[in-house]
Image: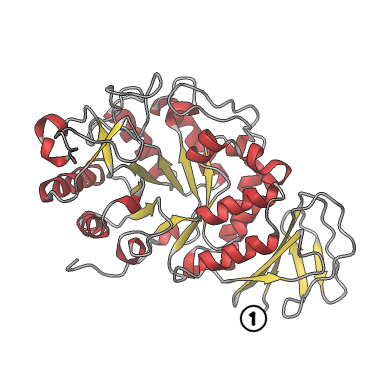
Amino acid sequence: MQHMKKQIHQEWSFDGVIYEVNIRQYTSEGTFKAFLPHLDRLSEMGVDILWLMPVFPIGSVHRKGSLGSYYSIKDFKGVNPEFGNEEDLRALIEKAHRLGMKVLLDWVTNHAAWDNVWTVSHPEYFKKGEGGGFVSPNDWSDVIALDYGVASMRKAMIDAMCYWVREFDIDGFRCDVAGLVPVDFWEEARYHLELIKPLFMLAEDEENGALMRYAFDMNYTWKVHHMMGKVAKGEESLGAFRAVFDQNNALYPPSVYRMQFITNHDENSWNGSEYERLGEFSEAFAALTFMLPGMPLIYSGQEAGYKERIAFFDKDRIEWGDVVLHGLYQQLIAIKKSYTPLHNGNYGAPIRWIQSNCSDTLLGLARKDHMNTIIAFFHFGNEVLPQVNVDTEGYEGEYTDLLTGETVKVDSNWHPEIQPGGYQLLALHHQR
């Protein structure tokens, strides 16, 4: 599009960590007000970016379950009364901003509810079937497809997005099934949004590199995520994991952020919690998402070690207990922020795999820049390792174990000792 320029990421995203908020299931009330006290805990944990799952009114026609899908939107400029009112949402955003956090709204552009307000005022905005009626995309029976061949619909959609930036001061969008919507729409939308304020944009997509040219800052790493599950179940080797990561990572320039995750709302509800999918390796894979190039995602309940699937269309409150993994994630976030090789995109350092005589069960990696070297090892096997011989050439020195604080001398005689399902994170500060 005319006037578009290459995206420049916002400074607050350079070392950022994103957290997905499921308002409906977060508390027994399932409201913005009830969620407010949790903001202090998330800020203390170190979260930078809040991604709010859709906050809009949900359609009633062909609704799934008792409460419906968040992604079946009745009014793109409305607030779901289940969660509260506009002032409640503003209070949430304002408090997040006071605590130094940014807020993204989950935005749905591919489809809308059967009783979306536009179906009455602008039925021409929607695709029609052979009989002239609205049609559902894919097999999503509770929504109908929008028509991006209609210029006035595109204008109305961009106007709705601008409304939330202008009136609620949000900081960006996570865009649902972004790859199903034309790239030129996203580029036009980003241009108009940036006239209001600088934003951060996350695309739910991995296949369409053109989305990352101008419109979006970050996309998903589904292939890497799914390989984690296969490795955990013994269906694929770590060699296959490294190969998939390298192939996937090579599709994009270093400036593109990739979102690393062990769970999210889709994975949890439809494929099972991280404990179902990753078993005893769930914590090690979580730590790995902080060591790989890209921005880590934490989903609601993940820091509580919550082991249940969360219902999608009905009320199913998360049980928080003692939030047993709060300290772990606080520590991992602090590590990511403190060491420049772990920063996002080209603000961090590239990855190099460290080879060893146990590379079939031990994943080793290094990230190094002029300030620091990070090396990390993850044991994704079920047996105690024999003596591990690693290729430490170029990484020798006295490191700090980031989890214990102990000093570790890494040289040709060093042999890491890691229990099954365990991991070790080491950092070396370069003398200047």
User: If the image is split into quadrants, where does the N terminus sit?
Assistant: bottom left
Location of residue 427 by image quarter: bottom right
User: Closer to the camera, 230 or 85?
Assistant: 230
Q: Is residue 326 above or below residue 374?
A: above
Q: Residue at x 86, y 67 (%)?
A: 415
Is there any visible trace of residue 145 in the rendered image? yes
User: Closer to the camera, 164 or 39?
Assistant: 164
Q: Residue at x 55, y 37 (%)?
A: 271
Residue identifier under label 1: 432
Tag count in the figure? 1
Label 1 Cα neighbours within 10 Å, binned few <14 / some 14-19 / many ≥20: few
Q: Residue at x 30, y 60 (%)?
A: 215
User: Closer to the camera, 332 or 105?
Assistant: 105
Q: Residue at x 64, y 27 (%)?
A: 321
User: Closer to the camera, 247 or 54?
Assistant: 247
Q: Is residue 376 above or below residue 128?
A: below
